[in-house]
Image (tube, rainbow, N blue to C red):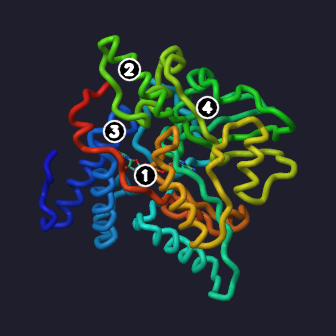
Amino acid sequence: GGEGPRAEAPPAERAAWLREQLQRYDYHYYVLDAPLVPDAEYDRLFRELQALEHAHPELQTPDSPTQRVGGGLLDELPKVRHRVPMLSIQTETDTTPAGAFAFDARIRKRLGLGPDDPPVEYAAELKFDGLAISLRYEEGVLVRAVTRGNGEEGEDVTANVRTIRQIPLRLQGVVPPVLEARGEIYMRRDDFERLNQRRREAGEATFINPRNTAAGAVRQLDPKVTAARPLSFFAYGIGEVQGWRGEPSTHGALLDALAHFGLPVSRERAVVRGGEGLAEFHARIAAKRDQLPFDIDGVVYKVNSLALQRELGFRNREPVWAVAHKYPAQEQMTLLRDIEVQV
Ligand code: NAD
């Protein structure tokens, strides 16, 4: 705890301390589903380490939290290697609407577009705050559910995920022989409140927030525990796919197809043009954020054309063609200190 070596300390000392802190926070957040600090605090330290490593590349270590996705796997759960890695998303540092224009400007530059070229089309959607999951369907039947884990390998939680009613055990219509749908398992706010109410009445410790409660509920050894927790799901992408006839060419059409197959896809999404379209979406969602039945920590922008996504590719374990544009954190420090943590 504490602030560690002061910001003016030798960079190597400060960087080592930041890595140690972040590794400890990662373990509690990703492995135990019980964060020690609010996300805003974590993000502050993370950005400081990133800046230090940027200024002093010799300080960067392969095991630095800045070089990885996620933070570890539960020993007790079987591991599965992802055929297509599950990566993170870069976060736009500017949380004002200007962040939308900054992302658009970067994309245009990378695509070599000039001021006279038409606006780039984007798919804008919500950034759900839960646990990333990959659902593998073979011949339309759910055969495996795997957590993101460290991005390369995740935890097999198939038996637990089968208990979630919003996740179809069988897809509908004409589906590709192999389809991995990726999305987020989350808990609605009202479900979370009711769960905590029941626990209070039973004299049990209450949960801190819907995100960690949902993640903890999925990563259980006993599917009965998962079944007793009210979980929901939204699909937002795909992993491995084989033999998809008439495969969509845009992200928007891809989400439409997933919805046709019977997977829950949020209606709060739009295909927009240019930085202006993104900024409008950002503002529209900010205005209704409190009325949404679930927590979000921002919005996500993705280049809509899948061909352009392939052209843009990946960098530092993150897609270049997507960005998370966050809203200021809702969670307060006091909340975490005052509530007992249930692991
Ligand atoms: P991230 O959660 O910021 O972004 C990547 C994830 O976004 C994906 O894995 C996916 O699950 C999710 N997502 C939600 N909606 C999506 C959509 N529409 N399209 C695509 N993906 C979508 O990145 P991360 O690496 O998982 O975690 C970093 C975050 O976790 C930071 O915000 C950090 O604050 C928090 N964290 C907090 C602590 C802590 O101690 N409080 C510790 C570690 C991490």
- Does residue 311 appear in this view? no
Q: Give the distance between the C-alpha atoms of the residues marked 4 and 3, in whole angstroms.
A: 22 Å
- Does residue 170 appear in this view? yes
Q: Give the distance between the C-alpha atoms of the residues marked 3 and 1, in whole angstroms.
A: 13 Å
Image disc number at residue 27: 3
Report helix, strand or loop for mark 3: helix
What residue is shown at x 50% (from left), y 32% (from top)? 187
Mark 1 / mark 2, whichever is N-terminal: 1
Mark 4 / mark 1, whichever is N-terminal: 1
Q: Give the distance between the C-alpha atoms of the residues marked 2 and 3, in whole angstroms.
A: 28 Å
What residue is shown at x 13% (from left), y 68% (from top)? 8
Against 328, residue 274 (above or below) is below
Mark 4 / mark 3, whichever is N-terminal: 3
Q: Amino acid at mark 2?
A: Gln
Circle 2 is placed at which residue position?
A: 197
Q: Amino acid at mark 3?
A: Tyr
Where's residue 178, x and y in %? 77, 39
Apparent side of residue 88 relative to residue 85 in the rendered image (left or right): left
Against 62, residue 169 (above or below) is above
Image disc number at residue 208: none
Report helix, strand or loop for mark 2: helix
Q: Amino acid at mark 1?
A: Arg
What residue is shown at x 48% (from left), y 56% (from top)? 286
Q: Nearer the viewer, mark 2 or mark 3?
A: 2
Mark 3 / mark 1, whichever is N-terminal: 3
Mark 2 / mark 4, whichever is N-terminal: 4
